[in-house]
Image (tube, rainbow, N blue to C red):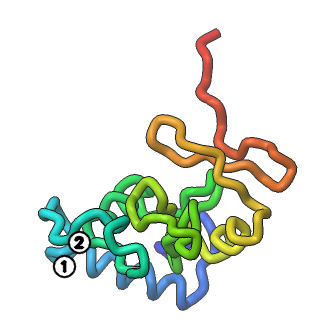
Amino acid sequence: MIASREAELSLTEGQTFALIVHHYLDSHDVLRRGQMSRRTGDTAERPDDRYVPASVKREVLERSNDHCEVPGCALRTFLEYAHIEAHAKKGSREADNLLRLCERHHTHLDADVLHFAGWHEGRPQFRDVHGVLLWPAPQHEQ
């Protein structure tokens, strides 16, 4: 009940369980907290490897606040790392090529129903299948 209120939508038992696990790990796993030095080089040096360094994952998690990065999506569970430039096309596993998306939006991105539209103030922007920008433009003073 509390988890559903916090997420502002009704969560399944599985989604609630995932939230509890995330909370527990965030509270108790030292590898999920703080800054640590990166032990591997740039992922471009190993194009066939699928490993995403922990420091990159932390950077993407911090940027996304562990929410789906598509505007208006409040999901915090069952999130995936999505490549902007596909791994199969030699896309890197660095933070500037990774997005934190729910399964539905990851599927839409891969199916070209949702399009990455660049970065604005360090946040990803998206366009729908009709080219409409989903990320709200900055408010101008009136």
Q: Nearer the viewer, residue 53 or 104?
A: 53
For residue 25, above or below residue 128: below
For residue 67, above or below residue 126: below
For residue 66, above or below residue 140: below
Q: Amino acid at mark 1?
A: Asp
Dot 1 falls on a residue whose secondary structure is loop
Q: Residues within 10 Å of mark 2 (few under 14, many from 20)?
A: some
* Residue annotated with mark 1: 29
Assign the C terminus to one quadrant of the image.
top right
* Residue found 34% across the figure and 74% down from its top: 46
Residue 120 % position (x, y): 53, 37
Residue 115 % position (x, y): 71, 55
- Is residue 115 visible from the viewing direction of this image? yes
Give the quadrant of residue 111: bottom right
**Alpha carbon distance from label 1 to label 2:** 6 Å
Residue 23 % position (x, y): 32, 76
* Residue annotated with mark 2: 32
Give the quadrant of residue 45: bottom left
* Residue found 86% across the figure and 49% down from its top: 130
